[in-house]
Amino acid sequence: MQALADRGSAGTGGDLAAGADAALLERVGKADRAAFSALVSRHYDAAYRVAYRMMGRASDCEDIVQDAFIKLWTNPGQIRQGQALRAWLMRVVSNLAIDRLRRKPMLNADEVPEPASDKAGPDIVALRSSVSAEIDTAIAALPERQRMALIFVYYEGLSNRDAAAALELSVDALESLLARARRSLKKALAGQWQDLLADIERLD
């Protein structure tokens, strides 16, 4: 739909852009395209990052994010509180990514190019890509729900409570997932953590 294709261009300014998710959701419930466009503008980048982290490829991310926002447009009433929108969106994007991964295996992180920064020289870009690839490969090997928990909390900054709600778990169960994910990553990167740390320090 046009509002999604424009990524919220109609809602990036004025009162709509400053409005709370709850107010925008209420308008979306009345088929207000400008409110929907504002929500897309506000949350598109975060949704795309989650899709990318889950998929390990850029080619399918836009389709996944579009499908998630279409679910929002067609049934905004399923989100009862505005503050729950972000967690809901993270869950829907992740589930869509998992469904697609089960049909099409994820790429090895080494095959996925990292976006280059215009401010960084080619040596720094290459080093950053190498470090990121090592970590992404370890994250990609985690069980699905561990990976989702890690992405929600450490990459997207959801609180443990919001992440637990997004995964439809108790906070204790979420924290258990995170602990297992951290242990798995520590084990996976054990043989190279000193090299990674040295590389990261070189990026400063």
Image (spheres, rainbow, N blue to C red):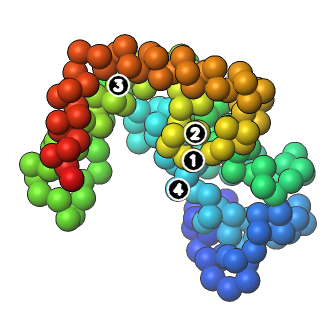
Q: Is residue 22 visible?
A: yes
Mark 2 vs mark 3: give the one in front.
2
For the residues bearing labels 3 and 4, Cβ distance under 8 angstroms: no
Give the Cα distance between marks 1 and 4.
14 Å
Seen at 23% across and 34% down, the residue is 197
Residue 116 percent location from the top left of the image: 24, 54
| Residue 177 left/right relative to 172 | left
Give the Cα distance between marks 3 and 4.
22 Å
Sequence order check, earlier mark of 2 and 3: 3
For the residues bearing labels 1 and 2, Cβ distance under 8 angstroms: yes
Give the Cα distance between marks 2 and 3.
18 Å
In the drawing, what numbered circle is on residue 153? 2
Q: Which residue is mark 3?
A: 137
| Residue 111 left/right relative to 83 | left
Q: Which residue is mark 1?
A: 157
- Disc 4: CA contacts within 10 A as few (<14), some (14-19) or many (>=20): few
